[in-house]
Amino acid sequence: MNILSSLPAIVALSKKRLGRGTGSGAGNKSGRGTTRHQTARTDIPLHFEGGQNRFTKRFPLLRGKGRNKVVNPKSLVVTIEQLSKLKTGTEVSQETLLSEGIISSDDKNRNIKVVGGGTIDIVLTVRLPVTKSAKEAIEKAGGKVE
């Protein structure tokens, strides 16, 4: 029994060698049709558009200009001098500031922060975020920050 005769026939065609001269039958334009100049090249980037500005560079807003900004609005600043207009022993909160007219009704949804600006000589209980200097001034006057 012959082993070679039992092997299957190889069906795959050998690869055509291109670009080996006009006499080979696969030379000249090497299977690229009637291509010349730029279309015959292989190293053109995918985003190349023939010299005009490429699509991704045309729209800076789509690439992130103005994106990734902080969504939260800035805190509304209330100074100690504004708080000194309140009565002694007042509990300072957002509702108190709104009722006393220190902040407007448009600002009721914003974050409020008490900062040191001026002097205070009345006792207050502050239930808002405060800066270091504002805390020192309120506690020096006999008030407290919660």
Image (tube, rainbow, N blue to C red):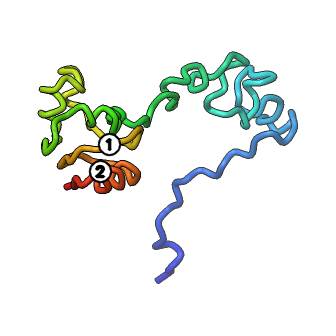
Q: Residue at x 13, y 45 (%)?
A: 89
The amino acid marked with disc number 1 is Ile
Residue 57: image location, x then y, percent: 61, 25
Determine whether label 2 and label 1 are within 8 Å by CB: yes
The quadrant holding residue 104 is: top left
Q: Residues within 10 Å of mark 1 (few under 14, many from 20)?
A: many
Residue 14 appears left or right of 134: right
Mark 1, secondary structure of its residue: loop
Q: Which residue is identified by label 1?
A: 120
Location of the C terminus by quadrant is bottom left
Residue 138's disc is: 2
Residue 126 appears left or right of 65: left
Residue 68: image location, x then y, percent: 43, 37
Q: Furthest-bottom residue in view?
A: 1
State the CA–CA distance, disc 2 to disc 1.
7 Å
The quadrant holding residue 90 is: top left
Q: Nearer the viewer, residue 10 or 51?
A: 51
Residue 111 appears left or right of 18: left
Residue 138: image location, x then y, percent: 29, 50
Q: Residue at x 50, y 61 (%)?
A: 9
The amino acid marked with disc number 2 is Ile
Q: Nearer the viewer, residue 94 or 79?
A: 79
